[in-house]
Image (cartoon, helix red, strand yellow):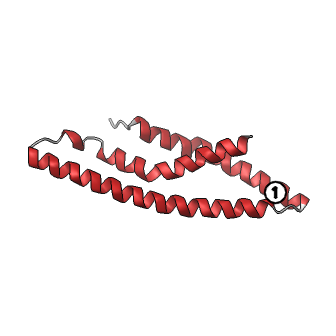
Amino acid sequence: MMFFSADLLDEFASLWFQAPMVMSSRMQDLAASNMNGSTGGTAEVGQMITEKLSAAVESLMAVNMAMVMEGMIAVTGLATGTCAGMAGASDRVAVAALKPYGSRVRANARRLSN
């Protein structure tokens, strides 16, 4: 049986439950702005693109740092003959990868629900 860390489950929950709500809210706002001729939709599309690109870069950097940290933990464990710090390494790397996306989804869910 596989267990996941609470941090990893939190990031998965944000993406699984809140992301569809954010997408739905954005699509409704885009449709409404197109119907009434406002330019708010254009700004929202620009924000979506900027958020995705910055989250991707931030995620890549976070994964690289997490991999370096996990490598240092592994080397230390091998040098000292202990492997206690290596448990949960994959969860920590996955959390590092998902956290930039999850934080943006949570922020957008708060912003769009008001």
From this view, report whether residue 21 is shown above or below residue 42.
above
Which image quadrant: the N terminus?
top left
Q: What percent of the width, then of the height, locates residue 87? A: 25, 41
In percent of width and height, residue 63 lies at 38, 56
Could you tell whether 99 is left or right of 25 in the image?
A: left
Question: Is residue 24 shown left or right of residue 98?
Answer: right
Residue shown at the point (59%, 48%) measured from the top left? 105
The 10 Å Cα crowd at callout 1, few under 14, some 14 to 19, many 20 or more, is few
Identify the residue at image location x=72%, y=53%. Answer: 26
Quadrant for the C terminus, please. top right
Q: Quadrant of residue 91?
A: top left
Q: Position of residue 15 (x, y in %)?
A: 55, 46
In the rendered image, which residue does mark 1 sit on? 31
Horizontal side, residue 89 vs residue 56: left or right: left
- The spot of residue 20 in percent (x, y) is 64, 47
- Is 9 rendered above or below residue 105? above
Q: Is residue 113 left or right of residue 105?
A: right
Residue toward you, 54 or 83:
54
Q: Residue at x 22, y 52 (%)?
A: 72
Q: Amino acid at mark 1?
A: Ala
Q: Residue at x 55, y 64 (%)?
A: 53
Does dot 1 land on a helix, a strand or a loop? helix
How many numbered marks does the figure carry?
1
